[in-house]
Amino acid sequence: MTKDNASSSMTQLLVNLAAFIVVVAGMKAAQPILVPFLLSAFIAVICAPLVAWLNRHKVPTSLSVLLVVFGLLSCSLLIAVFIGSSLNDFSQSLPVYQARLQEELSGVLSLLAEYGVKVSSDTLLEYFDPGMAMEMVANTLSGLGGALTNAFLIVLTVVFILLEGAGLPNKLKKALHDPVASLRGFEEFAIGVNRYLVIKTVVSIITGLAIAGWLWVLDIDYPFLWGLVAFLLNYVPNIGSIIAAIPAVLLGFVQFGAAKAGLAALGYLVANIVMGNIIEPRYMGRGLGLSTLVVFLSLVFWGWVLGPVGMLLSIPLTMIVRIALESSEATRWISVLLGPESESKV
C-alpha cells in the first residue's frame, strides 16, 4: 500500500510538472497577445481608485472611466513626445559622449600608471563597454514601446475592465457556489494587489521626481529622461534601481568627472534607501508576502517569459500565483515556501 501511495504521489508530481511546463510554454508562445492584456490589467488596477473616487462624488461610472482614460492618454502622449525628443537628442550626442569618455578613461589610466598599475586602454574598453549600460536601458524602453504599439487595444481593454469592474461582484455572487467565502478571498486578493500597485506607483513617481531634481541640480544632461527611467525601473525589484542609475552616473562622469558622478550615485543611493527601505515598507504594511529569493527569481522568470513587461509585473504576477496556490490544501505547502521566513515560523 505504501508503494502504491508513493507511486501515485510521484505520478501526480510528474503530471503537475508537465502541466506547469505546458502552461509556461503556452504563455511564452502567446506573449504578443498576453503582454498587452496584462499591461491593460496593470493600468486598470492603478486607475481603479480614481474611478471609485469619482463615483463617490456622484459622477456616473461611464463618465468616470472616460475622464480617467482621457487623462491617461494625455499624460501618455506628453511622455511619448518627451521620450522621443530626448532619445533623439541623446542619440545625436552619443558620439561626443563616447569621445569624452575615452578622454576621461585615459586620465584614469594615466593616474593608475603613476601608481604602478599598468592597464591597456584597449583591454579596459574590451571589458568595460559603457554602451552596454545605455543599450540595456534602451532595450527596456524599446520593449515597453513595443508593447505600447498596441495602444488602441490596450486602451480599449482598460475601458472594458474598468466598466466591468463595477458589476463584477454581483456576477460572482450569482456564479459561485459559496459566494461569501469565495468573495472574501477574492476581495483580499484584489485589495492586496491594488494596494501594492498604487503604493508602488506613488513611490516610483516620487523617486523619479527626486532623481530628476537632483540630476538637474548637478547640471547632468537629460535629467527628466533619467528621472522617467528611474520611475519605470523602480517597478523592477532588486536590480531596477541599479540599472536606472548606471547611464546617469556614466553621463555625469563623462561631463564633469568622477566628483559629479559620485554625487549622482549618492543621490540615487539616498533616494532608493529612503523610498525603498523607509517610506515604502511603512505604507506596504506586512510586505509583499514573498521571500527575497522568490522576488529575485520571479524577476528572472517573468522577464524570460514575458520580456520587459514581465519584469515590471513580476511581483503582482507572483502574488497572484501564491494566492492561487494558497487556496488549495494540496498546493498550500508551495505557497508557504514562496512566502517570507516570518510566515513559515507561524
Image (spheres, grey):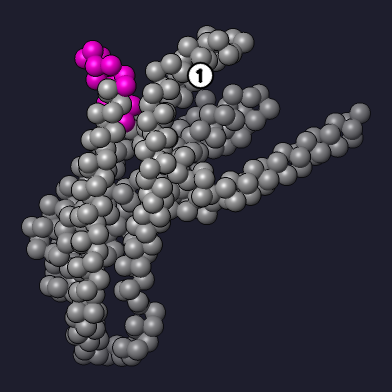
Question: Where is 215 relative to 175, above or below?
Answer: below
Total marks drawn?
Answer: 1
Q: Which residue is drawn at the image coordinates 34% and 83% (left, top)? A: 124
Tell me the residue at 52%/45% (across/down).
33
Q: Amino acid at mark 1?
A: Gly
- Residue at image position (24%, 20%) is 54
Instruction: Determine the secondary structure under disc 1.
Output: helix
Looking at the rendered image, the quarter that the N terminus falls into is: top right
Task: Check residue 27 for magenta coloring.
Answer: no
Above/below status of 306 relative to 254: above
* Horizontal side of residue 277 vs 328, given as left or right: left
Q: Is residue 14 visible?
A: yes
Q: Is residue 255 above or below residue 163?
A: below
Q: Residue furthest right?
A: 1
Q: Name the residue carrying label 1.
A: 185
Residue 76: give x, y in percent of width and height: 26, 45
Q: Residue at x 37, y 59 (%)?
A: 142
**Residue 275 image-quadrant placement:** top left
Q: Relative to residue 201, is residue 223 drawn left or right?
A: left
Residue 333 lies, in percent from the top left, at: 62, 31
Residue 4: percent from the left, percent from the top?
89, 32
Q: Main secondary structure of the magenta part?
A: helix
The residues colored magenta run 47-62
Counting from the top left corner in percent of width and height, residue 230 is at 27, 52
Q: Is residue 9 left or right of residue 229?
A: right
Q: Is residue 256 left or right of residue 300?
A: left
For disc 1, the neighbor class at 10 Å (few under 14, some 14 to 19, many from 20) is some
**Is 53 one of the magenta-colored residues?**
yes
Q: Write down the quadrant of residue 73 in the picture.
A: top left
